[in-house]
Image: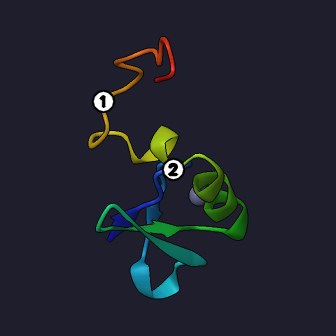
């Protein structure tokens, strides 16, 4: 059983509406709308891996 990172519900991979490979991790979605939300802001839902707003990009080099 996998967890839909957008709505946090359990998704059976075999029945997932969509799946995405992000940073080498597979994410399953209950619906196309959750899939879309994830693809628009994966860093917001994938959590764990990338640190949350750790640095402000001051002075673009
Ligand atoms: Zn969902």
Q: CA distance from mark 1 to mark 2?
A: 13 Å
The residue wearing badge 2 is 42
Can you say whether 10 is above or below 45 in the image? Answer: below
Furthest residue in direction front, as rendered: 61
Residue 14 shown left or right of residue 51 in the figure = right
Residue 25 shown left or right of residue 3 in the figure = left
Query: Which is more toward the observer, 61 or 20?
Result: 61
Can you say whether 60 is above or below 58 in the image? Answer: below
Query: Which is more toward the observer, 1 or 45?
Result: 45
The response on whether ligand 1 sits within 8 Å of label 2 is: no
Q: Position of residue 15 (x, y in %)?
A: 51, 84
Locate residue 48: give its quadrant.
top left
The residue wearing badge 1 is 51
Label placed on residue 59: none
Task: Name the residue located 46 percent from the left edge and 43 percent from the top edge.
Answer: 43
The response on whether ligand 1 sits within 8 Å of label 1 is: no
Q: Looking at the image, is mark 1 or mark 2 earlier in the sequence?
A: 2
Q: Position of residue 51 (x, y in %)?
A: 30, 30
Q: Secondary structure at mark 1?
A: loop
Query: Which is more toward the observer, 43 or 55?
Result: 55
In contact (CB < 8 Å): disc 1 and disc 2: no
Locate residue 2: give its quadrant.
bottom left
Mark 2 Cα-neighbour bin, 10 Å: few <14, some 14–19, many ≥20: some
Picture quarter with the N terminus: bottom left
Task: Name the residue located 47 percent from the left edge and 58 percent from the top edge.
Answer: 4
Q: Secondary structure at mark 2?
A: helix
Q: Quadrant of ligand 1?
A: bottom right
């Amino acid at each position: 059983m996998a967890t839909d990172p957008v709505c946090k519900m359990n998704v059976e991979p075999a029945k997932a509406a969509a799946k995405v490979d992000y940073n080498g991790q597979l994410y399953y979605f209950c619906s196309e709308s959750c899939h879309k939300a994830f693809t628009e802001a994966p860093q917001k839902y994938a959590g764990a891996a990338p640190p949350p707003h750790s640095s402000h990009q001051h002075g673009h080099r």
